[in-house]
Amino acid sequence: MITHAYVRYQDDKHLAIVPVEDIKNFNPNEDYSTAFFMVKWTDSTGTCAYYRARILRVGESEQDLKEIVSRKRVRVRPLIEDSDQASDGDSNVAPSKVDIGQGLRIPLETWRRVQARDKDSLFIKDLLVTIWDPAQLQGRSLQGKHCPRFPNRPRKDPLTPWKVSVMRTCYKRRLEKQGFPDSAVQTLMKRMNHYVGEKIADIDKMAKRVQRD
């Protein structure tokens, strides 16, 4: 009996093994190789959302798929992972980049500049435009929710959940290294959404200004 699928999300090409229950309208008896499906993603905070993905392979268990993928030498990451370490399969990546979590690599010098920011708001905003190109952030929002001020407007596309999860982990580690107690860390972490929203709003305003000019 088919229980799991190996998928590649369209937005960021991220690979993952998911239960078939997390795939909308999936029927293992039909040809799934050429179609896109809406597949659930759960980040480290427990927030869930569905994104377009292709099914690359199906299996009778999660372990079954891991073994198949391993034999093909394709690295599979779990849906939630907080590792900053690169795998052996990444050994050919240029040392000028650093893995900041879940295989997300950014230029080492850029990461050092981001870490050197003294204000949390600047740390978050600089990290945001390091992970995403500003052009990719235009017209998007953190979670894709309706704006309370404009409920009749269509939802904006959410940011890629696993990358947002990496940002949260980086911010949390920054706060912990600064010596904040757990209670304070949890409170300060809530500011991240606001900082991200501010930066995206600034990018949208600048894009509109350029269009007018």
Image: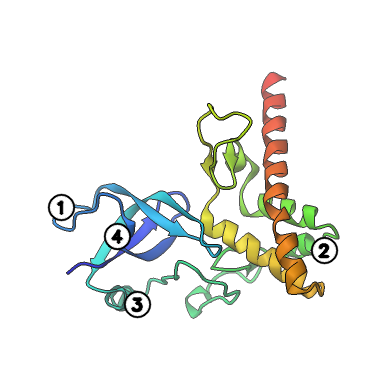
Q: Specify which label sits upstream in the sequence, 1 or 2.
A: 1
Dot 4: few (<14), some (14–19), or many (≥20) neighbours within 10 Å? few
Residue kind at label 4, given as amino acid type? Glu
Q: Secondary structure at mark 4?
A: helix
Give the CA distance from mark 2 to mark 3. Answer: 38 Å
Q: Give the mark nearest the N terminus, 2 or 4.
A: 4
Q: Can you give x and y, in whole percent of width and height, for residue 14 in the image? A: 45, 59
Report which quarter residue 185 is drawn in.
bottom right
Whether residue 190 is visible to the viewer of this picture, yes or no, is: yes
Residue type, numbered disc 2: Ala
Q: Which residue is mark 1?
A: 30
Q: Is residue 42 left or right of residue 192?
A: left
Read off the residue under disc 4. Answer: 21
Query: What is the quadrant of the C terminus in the image?
Result: top right
* Spatial separation of the CA atoms under disc 1 and disc 4: 16 Å
Q: Secondary structure at mark 2?
A: loop
Question: Viewer-proximal residue, 112 or 96?
Answer: 112
Q: Which residue is tagged 3?
A: 70
Q: Which residue is mark 2?
A: 116
